[in-house]
Amino acid sequence: MTLAPGTTSTRSAPAGTAAPSAPSTLDRPGMTGAIGSSRRRPDGVPKVRGEFAFSSDLFAEGALWGQVLRSPHPAARILGIDSTRARDLAGVHTVLLAADVPGSPTYGLDRKDQPVFASDVVRYTGEPVAAVAADHPEIARRAAALVEVRYAPLEPLVDPAKALEPATPPVHPDGNVFRHISLVHGDVGTEAPVAVEGSYEVGMQDQAFMGPESGLAIPDGAGGVDLYVSTQWLHVDQEQVAACLGLEPTEVRLHLSGVGGAFGAREDVSLQVHICLLALATGRPVKIVYSREESFFGHVHRHPARMWYRHSADRDGRLVKVEARILLDGGAYASSSTAVLSNAACFAAGPYKVPNAHVEADVVRTNNPPCGAMRGFGAVQVCHAYEAQMDRLAAELGMDPVDLRLRNALASGDELITGQVIKGTAPVAEVIRACAAAPMPMPDRQGALGEDGGRNGVGIGEESEEMALPGGAGRSADARRVRRGVGLAVGFKNLMYSEGFDDSAAAACRLERGVVTITSAAAEVGQGLVTLLQQIATEVLGIEKVVVAPADTGIGSAGSTSASRQSWMTGGAVEIACRRVRNRVLEIVAARHGLVAGLLELSGGKVVAFDGSLAEDLETALGDEVVEETVTYCHAKTMPLDGNGQGDAHVSFAFAAHRAVVDVDLDLGLVKVVEIATAQDVGRVLNPLQVVGQLEGGIAQGLGLAVMEEIVLEDGLVKNPSFTDYLIPTALDMPVVRISSLIEEPEPGAPFGAKGVGEPPTISSTAAIAAAVRAATGLPLTRVPIRPEHIALGGD
Amino acid sequence: MTGAIASAELSYELVVNGRHHDVNGALAGESLLYVLRNRLGLPGSKNACEQGECGSCSVLVDGVLVCACLVLAATAVGREIVTVEGLAGPGELSDVQEAFVENGAVQCGFCTPGLVVAVHDLLGRLPDPSELEIREAISGNLCRCTGYGRILAAIDEVRRRRLGELP
Ligand code: FES
Ligand code: FES
């Protein structure tokens, strides 16, 4: 593994062998060494050459440009719409309104409550009202501005607490509560000698992927349409788009084009319906590319949260009870709010043994922007609160915070507060210990040099010392008033979808003339699934020539690229499909040579017999014969939560710990994150370099939520929809990540024992940084992102 | 309205990656980024913000690193424009491109073309930058996927290779 100076990675030895999903006497995992190696991603070369076609790069002869007109009000009645002037503008081909939607007027992931175009009322700033197609994007923009919409503004409902009050008028006919969960576990009347209590908040974070929403729709001339788009889940888009167009799903074919990051923001439909409507209305290809500002309005965000907690414990630090009230602001439409709330409730107590728990959780509708999926959803918000509580409890008990966590750490066989017993691996104590044991970065504020001679983090020397201060050179009020703080946090989350939503993944493996082609509808969004699928195929088939075909709806659904599920689900489907192909190849070759298939194997692109009696190139052995297998992979069944929030709702869990070291300028309130150390439960490392990339990238987003990123709302209006005002970490903000350990305890049932790695890095990194800033300042700092004024003026 | 747009149409010539391109019927307000991507068939430079904040559109104009989204295309007439497509010959990779692929610096890749151009500029000006100088130099290039760790590793590898510290 190639790592930057200052980054270390020690992988613990696998505790057992992998658990293949289709056992066979011929299984020899690790045979080719494809699994576990840092293979190059197949799309790397086109991406560095600028030749990789993202959805915004697509071109079609005669294409028009689409533009959506959006509501400037968070809540208003629409009195009338006049599109005459827009239609009259030269170069405009069509202007579409709600009345032009031939099928379902609404769509949605969970509930179809979101209008394609608002017709009578708008419920959030940025809600689509009309769409235009024109010869040039500038003409389309001008035309959209010429659509005259007469609004009667209404008082927006922007306080989620008010949304819960029965007297508050509903924002939508479906009411203001998307979901309520009352989770009762054990004896909630139990009392304990020590209790700490606190209230916490999380702001609204944006996924801020770099590739803006974009796509190209091409009418097929027979009433159907082909849509090339960036998404996380082709089939769920297809279903919603077809319903709105009033077409059969087979008439709406989706093709995955290059995806410029996703992080949850591409789970919901954005431009998919609008662009197809425009293409079908004009009979021409239509292209839409959102501007960055429109992107801030065009997708859901991370739910802001308000949380109250009380932790009760014995004097020796054993948790007795956790009580919590959780309120998530879902914004105007449902999106995936119900699933986000489920995660918040299920994981409310953290990765700890908690015999008694009472959680009341709500997600409500307001006139704020809709919220939905973002990396680690639900789990991120509660982790900020329960980890702050664990530190409070440690202080109250006079205990070391790491010891307190170790005392209560969940392990395999323990019960969650949902009553579910963890059957898979749960190396919680291991991630905590490994993370806490990581060496401290140097130089520290006291000027001592560490064992690594200061190579870790920004360099030493006076000039860089100054630059490394919070805010950079010349921006500290007084360098002597910079304080260092250290904080540690642990978090966890489910892998895969939950609560009985047991979606499968289909994949095909085709072997033709020595080349393997893997086909699936799984969305590569940057995470590197295409590399893993190649590695799995090579591992199973012993063939290096593996092509991953472009994803489209021509094959069954792969489910969503979210919930850290694709390595397991599509990886599992590919593994089994490849095994079946291998078995058939061996049977075919065995029959031709009068041998026993069980004595043959595939290795290095050859069919070889154990006794050396045969070693034939696959191409020679099979000739023109094509061997193809398609598999639909399912994970273990899950159950909905019952009325007390109890049940086996989840498939598997992944854990991580983070330790943050920060320097804080007490006077200006600026924070410099000096280093993040981490240890993560990964099951098995499939591709070390890609795992490192997921950890570092996920931590960057956690850092953003801790000290930088928030969509600022004022009466339902977004105040900062640009990268000028919504700041995400740059290379100067992001510290060195020290990977202390990747814990490899293979997960039973998971292909090759590997757990998804994408989300845990984002869960507890925020909490660790917040803890470190608290340690540096002595302030309670219960809200993230922590802003300079919270520190400089001493309060949230 | 129609007249206002039509009368603003321009025709000019741009030199990109050493090749002459005719631009016909362009609106005066079109950025260099728009013209490269939509008129010249060079979509390698990316459009993550189109307001000068992300660096995904980084190109060299007369050897100077600029955000193509902030340059009016018509003002680039007569200048040498180099985009990501011009950094290496057909089927080849520059040392920076090679190091990005090899070191895991590419995930979704949307920031990649801009970063690759910016790194060529940096190491051309400053062959042996410190880690802090590197971080400073690429701090105008936003990446949402990688957390920059592997990007820094890739840059460091090119730096050492060019200095002869690596084979
Ligand atoms: S697209 Fe030019 S700086 Fe972002
Ligand atoms: S690799 Fe996705 S933005 Fe950098």
Image: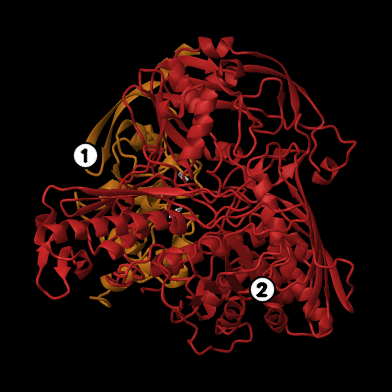
Chain B's shade in the image? orange
Is A231 left, or right, of A474 in this rendering? left
For disc 2, the marked residue is: A414
Quadrant assignment for the C terminus of chain A:
bottom right
Question: Can you tell which mark lies on residue A267?
Answer: none
For disc 1, the marked residue is: B19
In this view, the residue in front, A595 or A170, is: A595
**Disc 2, SS:** loop
Query: Tag 1, which chain?
Result: B
Mark 2: give few (<14), some (14-19) or many (20+) Cα within 10 Å. some
Image quarter of residue A662: bottom right
Is A31 left, or right, of A317 in this rendering? left
**Disc 1, SS:** strand
Image quarter of residue B107: bottom left
- Residue A248 horizontal/vertical position (percent): 46, 25
Residue type pointed to by label 1: Arg
Residue type pointed to by label 2: Asp
Mark 1: give few (<14), some (14-19) or many (20+) Cα within 10 Å. few
- Residue A199 horizontal/vertical position (percent): 82, 61
In this view, the residue in front, A208 or A589, is: A589
